[in-house]
Amino acid sequence: MELHWLDIAVFAVFVIAVLAIGILKSRGEKDSESYFLAGRGLTWWLIGFSLIAANISAEQFIGMSGAAAKDSIGLAVASYEWCAAITLVVVAFFFLPKFLRSGIFTIPEYLEYRYNHSARTIMSLLMVIIYVAVTIATVVYAGAKAVEPLFSGSVLGIPINLTSLCWVIGILAAVYVAAGGLKACAWADLIQGSALILGGAVIMVLTFMALDNPGDFREIDEAAVHASLGVEEDATFGEKFQKLKEAKMHMVLPADNTFLPWTALLLGIWIPNFYYWGLNQFIMQRTLGAASLAQGQKGVVFAAALKLVIPFIVCIPGIMALNLYGPKMQESAMQGDQMNKPVLAAFESARAKPDTAKKVFPFDKDFAVLETEMAQDILAFNAAVAGVAIPADAELAEMRQHFIASFNNDKHPNFQQKVKDIKKANEELDEGKEKKTLGLNDLNSHLVAMAAKDSKIEKQQELVGYDYDSAFAMLIRYLTPVGLKGFVLAALMGAVVSSLASMLNAASTIFTLDIYNEYINKNASQNHQVWVGRVCVLIFVLIGCAIAPQLASPKFKGAFEYIQEFQGYVSPGILTIFMFGLFVPRTPRICGVVGLALSPIIYGVLMIFWGDMPFLNRMAITVGLLMVVLAVMTVISPLREPLKLPEQDKIEMKSSKGALAFGLLVCIATLALYAIFW
């Protein structure tokens, strides 16, 4: 264990204090409204911090900082945060009034009033599945990934590794939410949200200091840092930062970028944003528990303002982590039990028996650059498996010529395009042009695709050059001093537990009120409902913890991309039917079921046949097709009269003019940030 006793003490005191305050504040919650919605008494500042703490967990600090570290993404990943600021303002003044006026406990409950009972049930089932298998599993994994580099060895005979840490984090969160409910989550969020923003700001400052004077910090090769930046050794901090800004701090990525193409900013990115912030139970549950509409709107707009700060304390440190600790991130990729280590062992085993080998091994560009000799060996092995003959010790240009012959024999249009690409690369190489040419990873990916058409040949997990998800963990491990490390770690772990608690509470709320009460026990008492919710929490966390360690596999492309990709099956359908339900009064009731049922089918078909298309573009296409279908259904068979939804009279529904003015300022500030980093 690399933690000093002072770090351990700070960590323990912080975690115990947060747990105690949260549970004490929620004492006496015996009825479902108190347990699931905090008695509808949350004030704006509690809502605002709770929204941020529930959102910026290890999922952001690990997944988003890891995405920012990649050369192909950089600061562009911040669009998820800055677009969220505008989204929250819209949610506060267009979504929230309708939801609070109806007096609902859960988001799916609204569908029963607007569409029908089947729509409510389908959405409830989909959201529970997504929470347990995707969001809860991702946050558990990201939390364990954050602290894994700080531990080694075993405790009481139990090995301290990614898997065991996943179980510790998940069980801690389950005990917490089962005991306290939403109010416990909200009060803990207030403390942990503040601490997390402070801790992230400290890491940001330390990262700036390390970039300015890398020689003053341990495990940093000063010459390597300057070389990676392309600056002289006496370069100033401003010159170094400017190099990073030019290379990776911009918001627009090429249209063919698979993560966040600029085209996604027009429509695609708004789909997960509006789904997450406006229709996501674990987020909206805080606003549904607001004391009044004005309090809810103030809290949501306050959270929107805080979202503008997040990229500076998450994304920018992640970008710099690769320059500061690239070798450590490379080492983590090569030695990780869920990363390259088992794949390389499988390669050595297959190479020992080439006549019986039926496996091919993909690798990314980073691996090809960092492990060139090994990449060439793998390329030659894959060529033999695919039936492509290349001379031993061939130079890259010579390899290209041999691949042309092989690709010409394949009639698939994609391969024909690759033939043209390789020919062009050879021509540019012969002419000495300094243009992008196909490298080892390009050739290998084509080989793997050719071989994989044979069902008897097994495609292995991709080998990667860097463990990008370890970026923020490296900063915590090597930059933070004694005592402060314990505080940052406690804030991060507190936020992980807080986010998990929120998700578990949301999943248990939906299951208890929308499924158990409706289909299993319609006469369940208030006390019984609370206990069902607590049992659900324990079951859901067991499933999430079982899935979490598997996310270390490079095939999932990192924690952040995993959660966005798989939510794409449900978020387009949910968003579309809510948009029609909220703003198209005559949309027929059957549209709720149709939209929810078609969404995963359309997205799945796009995934199968156009898997290389950016997932945000697939979401946009799915929404577009669903809108056409629902619009046609509305034109053909509209409701005779707009539905009159139920209205409650417990909550003051007067809108906040001050929140509206501040929300407009947040939108202007967001556009200004895009202009600066465009």
Image: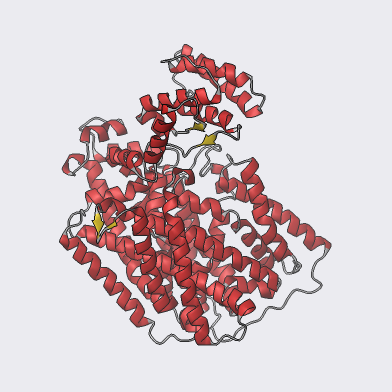
Q: Is residue 453 left or right of residue 135?
A: right
Q: Is residue 110 left or right of residue 391?
A: right
Whether residue 662 appears in this view of the structure is: no
Given residues 433 and 673, the one toward you in this image is 433
Can you say whether 126 is above or below 601 in the image? below
Report the residue at 47% width, 69% height from top.
Answer: 539
Given residues 323 and 297, the one toward you in this image is 323
| x then y, percent, for residue 522 | 62, 83
Numbered circles on residues, count: 0
Given residues 293 and 384, the one toward you in this image is 384
The image quadrant of residue 302 is: bottom left
Q: Quadrant of the N terminus?
A: bottom left
Q: Residue furthest right?
A: 636
Whether residue 405 appears in this view of the structure is: yes
| x then y, percent, for residue 236 | 23, 37
| x then y, percent, for residue 234 | 20, 33
| x then y, percent, for residue 263 | 57, 43
